[in-house]
Image (cartoon, rainbow, N blue to C red):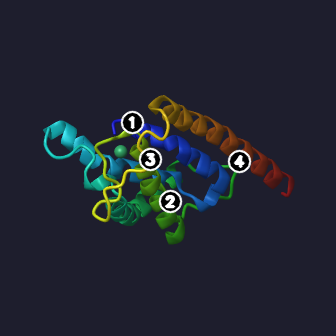
Amino acid sequence: MPFTPLHMGPGMLVKALLQGSFSLTLFGWTQILMDLQPLLAIITGEGQLHGFSHTYLGASLIALIAALTGKHLAEWGLRLMRLPHLPSSSIITWPVVFFSAFVGSYSHVVLDSIMHSDMSPWFPFSDAHFLLGWTSIEALHQFCLYSGLIGATLFYLIQWWQAKRHARHH
Ligand SMILES: [Zn+2]
């Protein structure tokens, strides 16, 4: 927080590379759940901005919650946006659901660790904060933005190529 949408950039790149083995919707749902606690802290002015939700332990719990609550939500989203020229299924298997949620919550902690000094990612095991300041906030934002742009381009190129190949076989 407060840059939740930036997390979608790297997610888009992973989606482009893994296609059907990764759910971008579930990844996105996880990003929203991850930043609920900081959002609440901002609104109420109480509690730590990046508290338990932004630790690897908290992120593991949030990934589980995101997976259990997000499967049907994401499947519903898939049915809404189904690409008519592809024989895609609107079922997301549980392994894909859990994988996407965990990639979502852990990548969130990694990226936020670099820029937020009030985090304690390894709580309660250690107060280490290895990644803080590893790169500039500007470089981090650019990484998120460009990985999103490259990911989206790659994703649609692969989809287009698959649709073309599919059309040729029928
Ligand atoms: Zn965050």
The residues bearing labels 2 and 4 have C-alpha atoms spaced at a distance of 20 Å
In the rendered image, which residue does mark 1 sit on?
3
Q: Quadrant of the C terminus?
A: bottom right
Q: Earlier in the sequence, mark 2 or mark 1?
A: 1
Q: Residue visible at 76% across and 49% down?
A: 163
Query: What is the secondary structure assignment of the residue under circle 3?
Result: loop
Residue occupied by mark 2: 100
CA gap, disc 3 to disc 1?
A: 18 Å
Tag in front: 2 or 4: 2
- The first of marks 2 and 4 along the sequence is 2
The residue at 32%/46% (across/down) is 35
> Which residue type does callout 3 highlight?
Leu
Q: Which residue is mark 4?
A: 159
Amino acid tagged 1? Phe
Name which residue type carries label 4: Gln
Q: Which residue is labeled 3 in the image?
A: 131
Q: In the image, residue 19 lies at what x, y percent?
A: 64, 55
Q: Residue 128's mark?
A: none
Q: Earlier in the sequence, mark 1 or mark 4?
A: 1
